[in-house]
Amino acid sequence: MRGLSRLEFAVAVVLVGVLIAVALPRLASSRVAARQVRLKMLMATTQATANLFHLRCESQPPAPGGLDPACGELPLQGQKVVGIHGWPAASADGIAVAVNSWGDTADIDWRPDRIDGVPALRARLKPTAVAGECEFIYAQAASPGAAPRIELIDATCP
């Protein structure tokens, strides 16, 4: 019976080491790409959710004494979502609860902010060892007839 010699075993170990050294950077870059895709999908979900809220708001009957419908609070996916000017508010009980109602968002950190004097929320993917924070900003509608701003912040997402 013949097994591997020490030389053959050493060569096999070296080859496995080289393969791992080549594969690890590719794995890290695919994780970064996956985070970027996750952030863009989250942004698209936020935009779609805001549009859904707005469409439901427009379908509401007008408020008493007013021309616009009363959309201070509307149900989306079984959750009550607070609105401002016909769009979800940039708050924990506004756009954050609306987006969270669509699925698991445990990897997202919602932080209040202000953009040009308007309340906003920063949606950040929690950092990992491979990649830093990836984030975008949702700034609520500044006035009636205006739409919210959703902007990707590329500088923080490698």
Image: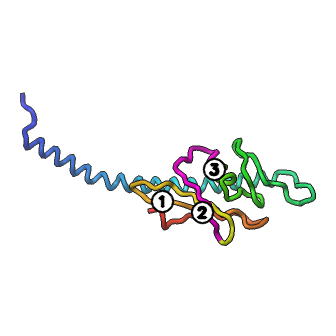
Quadrant of the rendering where the N terminus is positioned: top left
Query: What's the distance in space between the residues labelled 3 and 1, CA to CA?
Result: 19 Å
Which residue has dot 1 on it?
133
Query: What's the distance in space between the residues labelled 2 and 1, CA to CA?
Result: 13 Å
x, y (%) of residue 34? 46, 53
- The verdict on residue 131 being magenta is no
The amino acid type found where label 1 is placed reads Glu
Q: Secondary structure under badge 1?
A: loop
Which residue has dot 3 on it?
99
Horizontal relation, residue 139 to residue 35: left or right = right
> Looking at the image, is 56 positioned above or below residue 117?
above
Name the residue rendered at 57%, 57% in the picture: 123
The amino acid type found where label 2 is placed reads Ile
62 or 94: nearer the viewer = 94
Horizontal relation, residue 6 to residue 148: left or right = left
Label whose residue precedes the other's in the sequence (3 or 1): 3
Q: Secondary structure under badge 2?
A: strand
Label whose residue precedes the other's in the sequence (3 or 2): 3
x, y (%) of residue 41? 56, 53
In the rendered image, the residue lying farthest to the right is 65
Numbered tag placed on residue 13 in the rendering: none
